Image (cartoon, coloured by chain):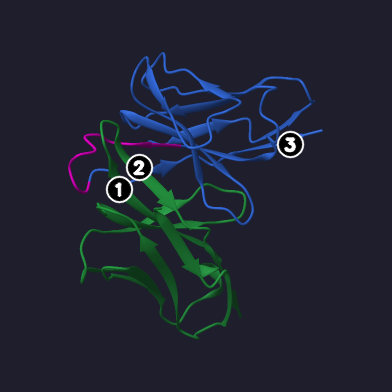
Chain colours: A green, B blue
Amino acid sequence: EDQVTQSPEALRLQEGESSSLNCSYTVSGLRGLFWYRQDPGKGPEFLFTLYSAGEEKEKERLKATLTKKESFLHITAPKPEDSATYLCAVQIPLPNTGNQFYFGTGTSLTVIP
Amino acid sequence: DGGITQSPKYLFRKEGQNVTLSCEQNLNHDAMYWYRQDPGQGLRLIYYSQIVNDFQKGDIAEGYSVSREKKESFPLTVTSAQKNPTAFYLCASSRIPWDRVGANVLTFGAGSRLTVL
């Protein structure tokens, strides 16, 4: 069964304290892995897409990496405005119906000033 | 600016009532989706559509219905048959073709929160 698991469920960091969020997946035929940021009561916002093992993407204090079984979202020197829920999603092909996206349950990040 | 507009943001439903959530996009995307988000669970797909007048059931379609009469619009009706409709509903869209790597970033609306009284 295709699965996406994110850990930890919640993470509290002091401002400036770097850490990593994990997204592990067991799917057949990964076409892409996506990271989204979701603020409370709002829709997810796209951050990164990764397609193959070894790929890395960076944006400000965030860096996403991908291996054959998992992805990490590294947060360097976080600020309070980085507080949000971070969602991971994988895209897999389905016969005759295009692609499907499977989402993890997210990691709720709180950065304390 | 291009984007997805969902309305209403908050909706209250009495038991036995049908309600319709609106989703409009001006991104010229071919594909549109409806997801349901519950605490402690990942987003779950309700319905999706790749072209006008065609749509497919997702993982949790029971108790829901959709239509796609225009490329820009993909309304979701939550029927009285949906036993536990209280949730946060998200509409999304993406480009096609899906069989090309890199095409499928989802753009989400701001969501609609439905509460059953």
Do we see residue A108 in this rendering?
yes
> Magenta region's main secondary structure?
loop
**How far apart are labels 3 and 2 at the CA level?**
28 Å
User: Callout 3 environment at 10 Å: few (<14), some (14 to 19), or many (20+)?
Assistant: some
User: Callout 2 environment at 10 Å: few (<14), some (14 to 19), or many (20+)?
Assistant: some
Vertical placement of B18 versus A58: above or below?
above
Region in magenta: B92-102
The x and y percentages for residue B113 are: 66, 39
> Which chain does tag 1 point to?
A
Q: Name the residue under label 2.
A: A100
Dot 1: element: strand
Q: Residue A27 carries which label?
A: none
Quarter that holds the N terminus of chain B: top left
Which mark's residue is nearer the viewer, 3 or 2? Answer: 2
Dot 2: element: strand
Dot 3: element: strand
The x and y percentages for residue B59 are: 48, 37
Magenta stretch holds residue B96: yes
Kind of residue indicated by mark 1: Ile
Of label 2 and label 1, which has the lower sequence position? 1
Q: Are both tags, 3 and 1, on one chain?
A: no
Do we see residue A61 in this rendering?
no
**How far apart are labels 3 and 1 at the CA level?**
32 Å
**How far apart are labels 2 and 1 at the CA level?**
5 Å
The x and y percentages for residue B2 are: 38, 36
Kind of residue indicated by mark 2: Gln
The x and y percentages for residue B20 are: 61, 22
